[in-house]
Image (cartoon, rainbow, N blue to C red):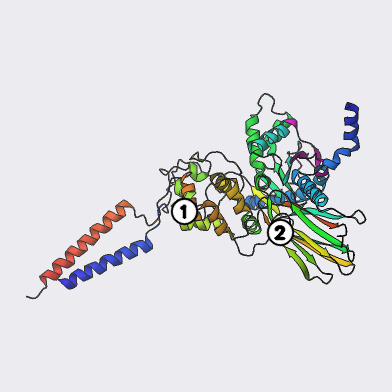
Amino acid sequence: MRIILVLLAVTGIPRVLIGQRWERQVQERVQRTIAAVGPSPRLPVVRRSGMLNTDEAASFQTTLAQHTPYAIIAVCDDDCSRLQLTLLSPSGSDIAKERNSESLPILHFTAATSAVYGIRVVMEACRWNPCWYAIAVVPLRKIPS
Amino acid sequence: MASLKRWVLVGLVGCLALALAYLPPRGATSSGRSVFAPQSPRGTPARQRAQAVADEWRGADASLRLLRARRQLQQLVRQASAGTSLIVVSESGDVWAAAPPIADSAIHVAWRRLGLGETKVRVAVVIQQAAQSQRHDRPAAEGGLAVYLAPDSTDRTTCIAVVSLGSYWSRALAGDLRGRLPLFEALVQTLKAGLGPCAFYAAYGTPGKSVRGWLVSRGWDLALTLDAGARGRQGNSLIGMADPRYPWYWEAIYSVPPTAVACLASRPDGCRAAVLAGASDDPTIPIPDIVRIDRHWGRVTRLVEDQRFLGDVARAVGRDRFLSFWTSALPVDTALAAALKRPVGEWTVDWQRDFVRPIRLGPAPPLGGVAIALAIAVLAIVVVTGTASRRQIR
C-alpha cells in the first residue's frame, strides 16, 4: 500500500485533486446538476469554469445543434450569492437572460438552426473575491412528443 | 459716553481679530534647542542626493526581482498541493533556495496567528536575505523595505511578497550570530508584518474596484498590518512616543500632514479627509500592480498609526461587515460608513484617541505676551477715557 502511495506521489496522479476547495466545490456542484437534468448520451456536454470578482463577466462561444433541447447551467461557490447567465445569438444580441435564480441559473433553449451562440456569465454578488463558477451546456434527451 | 463705549468695543474686537489672524498656532514657536543637545546628524546635500538615488535604485531593483519571481513562483504554485495557501522561498544574491527552516517555521506561525488557513488568494513569500559579501557596485540592501505583487498581475489568486530581511536577520539566519541568537518571536513578528497587503488579500480576497483603487492610490498605507495587536498608547509611532512637555513634541506633530494634525485634535472632518484621501469615483488600477512599502520607523504618515487602520476596522466590525465593505461597489466613504455604522470621521476620532492623547489647536499666545498686551490695552483705555472725560463740555 505504501509503495502504491509513493508511486502515486511520484507520477503525479493525485494532481487531479489539485485546486482549491472552492474550485472543487463548483466542479462537484456542476457535475451533480448535469446528472439531475438528464444529459443526452449522443452529444457531448460543453463545460467551462473560472473565477470572477464581483461585477466581472466572462463569455465564451459554443455551437448548438438544431432542434436539440439544451439546458445551460451555471453554478458558483458558497461565497457567491447572485450569478447572471445570458445566452447570446450569433449576432451578439441577448436571446435569454436568467438572473433570478441567485447562484444556480439555468436556461432552456432549442436552436432553430445550428450556429455558434455566445454564453455570458456575470458575477453579480461575491462576498469573498474571487468566486469560482462553472458553466455546462447540456444537450438533453429528446422530449417525447 | 455711549459713543466711547462703542469705540472701546470696536477696538477690542479689532484686537481679537488681529490676535486670531497673527498669533502663532500652538507649538509653532521656536523649539529653543539647548546648546547641550546633540545635533541631529544630517548629511551634506551631495550625500542626501546619493541616498535618494540609492533608494530609487533599491525600489527599481525590488520591482525587477518581483517580476522575475513571478515566473519562478508560477511553477511552485502549480506544484503546491491542494489546500496550500502559503508558499515560502528564499533568495540571496539572485540564488533561489528553500527558505531556512527557522524562517519557514516562523512565517507559518505568523500565518496561523493571523487566523489564515486555506485562502482564496494564495501568498507566495520570497524572503530576501542580504548577500554575504557586499557588492560595491550597488547600494547595500536594507531591511524594512517590502515589495508586493497583487493578484491579477500573475494569476487571479496569487499575491507575491518580497520581504527584505536586512543584514542583521540575514546573518542570524546564516548562523553568524551564534551565541547571540535573536528571539524566534521577533522573527515571527517581522515576517507577520512583512506579509503586508498580501495578508489582507489572503484574509478577505480581492477588494472591490473602489476600495482597491483607493488603497493603490495611497500605497496601501492603511492596510499594512492585518493584526497589530490590542489598541493602546504603547508609543509605536514618533508622535505616540513624544512627550508634550518637550519642545520636539510639536515638531513631531507638525511633521504629519494638516489633515492628520486636525485628526489628532479630534476634528471629525480632518480625520475623514485623512482616511478618505485618494478615494475616487473612477479609480485606476495599474498592471502590474506593484506595491512598494517602506516600513522604516519614523516615515511620514497620513494618519498616526495608519498602518493598522483597516486591520482595526476589520476587528471592530467583524468579518461579515468588513467583507461587505471590502467588496462593495459603492464609493469608499459610503461603504466604510455602512460597515462602521457611523460616519467615518467620528469613528476615526475615537480610534485615534486610543493611540495619542488629543491635542489642542488654535492660536496660542505666550503668557508674558498676553500680560503685556493686556496691560498696554488697559493703560490705553484709561488714558483715552481720562482725556475724553476731561475734554467733555458740560
The question of residue B85 being in magenta is answered with: yes
Relative horizontal placement of residue A9, taking residue B245 as reference (left or right)? right
The question of residue B288 being in magenta is answered with: no
Q: Position of residue B173 (x, y in %)?
A: 72, 32
Q: Amino acid at mark 2?
A: Pro
Q: Kindly indicate the quadrant of the structure image that contains residue B361.
A: bottom left
Task: For label 1, count other residues whose C-alpha is less than 10 Å away and answer few (under 14), some (14-19) or many (20+).
Answer: some
Q: Residue furthest top?
A: B179
Q: Position of residue B323 (x, y in %)?
A: 62, 50
Q: Amino acid at mark 1?
A: Glu
Q: Position of residue A66 (x, y in %)?
A: 89, 66
How many badges with numbers are in the image? 2
Residue drawn at point x = 77 percent, y = 39 percent: B89
Using the image, determine if residue B171 lies above or below residue A27: above
Query: Magenta part of the protein: which range?
Result: B77-101
Chain of the residue where label 1 is placed in the rendered structure: B
Provide the residue designation for mark 1. B346
Task: For label 2, count other residues whose C-alpha is less than 10 Å away and answer few (under 14), some (14-19) or many (20+).
Answer: few
Q: Nearer the viewer, residue B254 or A140?
A: A140
Relative horizontal placement of residue B290, taking residue B40 as reference (left or right)? right
Earlier in the chain: of badge 2 and badge 1, it is: 2
Q: Which mark is residue B286?
A: 2
SS type, badge 1:
helix
Q: Is residue B271 visible?
A: no
Q: Nearer the viewer, residue A98 or B88?
A: A98
Q: Is residue B389 visible?
A: yes
SS type, badge 2:
loop
Q: Residue furthest left?
A: B394
Using the image, determine if residue B214 lies above or below residue B90: below
Q: Position of residue B7 (x, y in %)?
A: 22, 70
Relative horizontal placement of residue B113, taking residue A40 as reference (left or right)? left
